[in-house]
Image: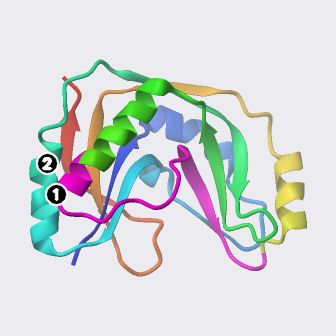
Amino acid sequence: MPRLFTALALPPEIAAGLAPFRGGLPGARWIEPADYHVTLRFLGDVPVALAEDAVEALSEMRARPAIAVVLDGLSVFGGDKPRALLASVAANPDLMDLQAEQERLIRRAGAEPERRKFVPHVTLARLRREATPEAVAMALSQAPIFTPQRFSATEVVLYSARDSTGGGPYVAEAAFPFA
């Protein structure tokens, strides 16, 4: 069973711009910059037949212009039990529309509905127990000033991932250009 998700890939220069935020946090398992992405729809471990149906459904994605994506700061998921350090993505109605279309297409292919609210972001590190709230707060306060990073997304990529721990390496299985 492949583990799949759809996402926007980050251009190499944007990924490189996030490099200064790597390191200095005990308990962090850093994602490789080549694997940075903005997840649109996580499918999880799916049967091969559903993966094939998802590719067919995604090929019907409607044409659209490029979407402006802005990474606007550092944040963390998990609150008192931090589990991920991330670069947040500024609110964007075009991105929300794209994600909603991904959800519709993937559900039409037979996947279960996504139960989590879509919060666009780029995961920089997955955090273990050693990454206490205090350590995360200290790392964020000592991080370099975050300069917004901007890029234009022109396609959705269907990625596969190893089923062990997440975090890459990811393999681009298919790409679906916007126009």
What label does residue 57 carry, if any?
Answer: 2
* 4 relative to 166 in the view: left or right: left
Horizontal and vertical percent position of residue 138? 90, 57
Horizontal and vertical percent position of residue 136? 82, 61
* 62 relative to 26 in the view: left or right: left
Q: Is residue 56 magenta?
A: no
Highlighted magenta segment, given as a residue range: 105-130
Q: Give, as a three-letter code, the residue at label 2.
A: Ala
What label does residue 109 carry, if any?
Answer: 1
Q: SS of the residue at dot 1?
A: loop
Q: Point out the image quarter for the N terminus.
A: bottom left
Who's the residue at 60% across and 31% down the image?
90
Q: SS of the residue at dot 2?
A: helix
Horizontal and vertical percent position of residue 18? 61, 42
Who's the residue at 53% across and 24% down the image?
150
Q: Residues within 10 Å of mark 2 (few under 14, many from 20)?
A: some
Who's the residue at 14% across and 53% down the image?
55
Who's the residue at 81% across and 45% down the image?
143
Q: Is residue 117 magenta?
A: yes
Q: Give, as a three-letter code, the residue at label 1.
A: Ala
Q: Are marks 1 and 2 in contact (CB under 8 Å)?
A: yes
Q: Give the camera-side residue of 168 and 88.
A: 88
